[in-house]
Image (cartoon, rainbow, N blue to C red):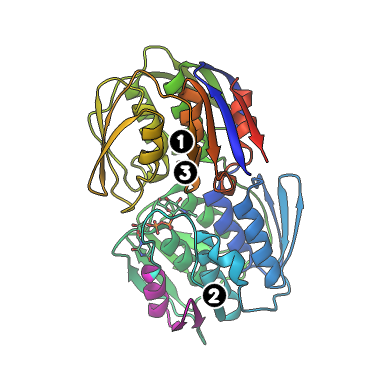
Amino acid sequence: MDAIHVLGGNALFGETKIQGSKNAVLPVMAAALLIKDVCVIENCPHISDVYHMQQLLGSTGCKVVRSGETLTIDARNISEDTMAGDHVTGMRSSITLLGAMLGRTGEVTMAYPGGCVIGERPIDLHLNALRRMGVAIYEEEGRFTARAKTLEGAVIRLPVSSVGATENIILAAVTAKGVTVIQNAAMEPEITTLCEFLREAGAVIEGIGGSVLMIQGGHTLHGIRFRVPADRIVAGTYLMSVLGTGGHIFLEDAPVAQMRSMIRTAEKIGAEIHVTRDGLNIIAKDYKNPIPYIKTEIYPGFPTDMQSVLMAVLSTCPGESVIEETIFEDRFRIASQLRKMGARVELKGKRQAVITGVDSLLGCEVAAEELRGGAALVAAGSMALGETVVKNCHFIERGYEDICRDYQNLGVNIFWQR
Ligand code: UD1
């Protein structure tokens, strides 16, 4: 019975603080496994993916203690090389532990990772890259074992700049013998955060922020205190929301430098945006312009994780908008739910959505099918007239600490039904 009730249709006014980043904290937690010491990680969001990662680290013998937003990870003693199935299959980013476990123990058995149903999401790029570093992979039904006597540095050109594969190669490379070069590396801010964490801990990494990373393996890593940046996708969710409702909001701690493409898109829709020293001030006055064409892209382009909430907003912008999804092949599941709310969304194949704006969405019962789409339905509920009930909200809790609290801070009448 994890539903969210939203009484929508009113402008948003208020301010809310943006939580720490899910996609940044998870690889950093995995990286802590490589360090035979104690790491203190600040600004860790209270979300179920972090909880699962804590359990996974615990299952290796690592000691993880949470105090408020701070996690202390003591990886001095590691025992197990098998990852507990339930936690692995529940979360895509558990695959990041592959590189970290190989780096630490040279062997790991994992169930195939799960995560949101937004397309195929294979792990071939991860496994092929690790093979090039001397890892042998034995696949069995539903799980696989990866083993390396010694990890060897290698030159790896990724055919697709996969975020997860880049993270895994980095994690394996910091303990490998020799130099690893990653060409066509993902440039998402979460990769930069992971590299900065490792560099502060003693790793030697060059090219941070760019598409070619060079990692010199074998340096001793030591425990550090590190702060996780704020979540650009959570901030983007509220930035887009206010364009569907109108109003004036302030997003404290929004990671502005990572949000350029979202800010540009919001400005095209009609937002007036002011960057301040501690966040983002958004005024939606002359708003609701459609966007003739936009596509999701790798960073620094418009993020695929923001695509669903953008679709919700464009549903309320009179005129025609077109969204092309270039990253995942099945990420328009929200369209059928938005249609229930009165949106006019036509799918052209699996990659293109044509949205014809309506005057207003109408509240009704909808169901989340995955994390970002679920959050977008809550955003749609804040725009819709009447009451929207969003079911299956455990998906949203994978990445949002408390979406109701945040919307309440922005003046929305919204509550959990547990
Ligand atoms: C990460 C993010 C996710 C975001 C995505 C794209 C985390 C925990 N998740 O996911 O929120 O939507 O980046 O920015 O950080 N691919 C393959 N083979 C592979 C790996 C990927 O074909 O082995 C394909 C995928 O199917 C997809 C594309 O590459 O089409 C990009 O995926 P990738 O960047 O790997 O996404 P994730 O790391 O899974």
Q: Which amino acid type is marked by label 3?
A: Arg
Find ligand 1 in the image and state its quadrant. Answer: bottom left
Q: Earlier in the sequence, mark 2 or mark 1?
A: 2
- Magenta residues span 124-146
- The percent coordinates of residue 100 (x first, y second) are 56, 69
Which of discs 1 and 3 lies nearer the camera? The answer is 3
* Mark 2 CB within 8 Å of ligand 1: no
Task: Tell me which numbered mark, 2 or 3, is placed earlier along the sequence.
Answer: 2
The label shown at residue 257 is 1
Which residue is drawn at the image coordinates 60% and 39% (left, top)? 3
> Could you tell me if residue 310 is visible in this image?
no
> Is 128 one of the magenta-colored residues?
yes
Q: Nearer the viewer, residue 156 or 60?
A: 60
Residue 254, horizontal then vertical, whole percent: 54, 33
Residue 174: % across, % down:
52, 69
| Residue 130 appears in view | yes
Marker count (numbered): 3
Q: Secondary structure at mark 3?
A: helix
Q: CA distance from mark 2 to mark 3?
A: 26 Å
In the rendered image, which quarter is residue 213 located in? bottom left
Marks 1 and 3, how far apart in space?
A: 21 Å
User: Residue at 52% across / 87% down in the picture?
Assistant: 149
Compared across the picture, whether 20 is left or right of 232 comes to right
| Residue at the spot of label 2 | 110
Q: Could you tell me the amino acid type at mark 2?
A: Met
Which mark sits nearer the N-terminus, 1 or 3?
A: 1
Callout 3: CB less than 8 Å from ligand 1: yes
> Could you tell me which residue is drawn at 70 percent across and 75 percent down?
78
Q: Which residue is mark 3?
A: 372
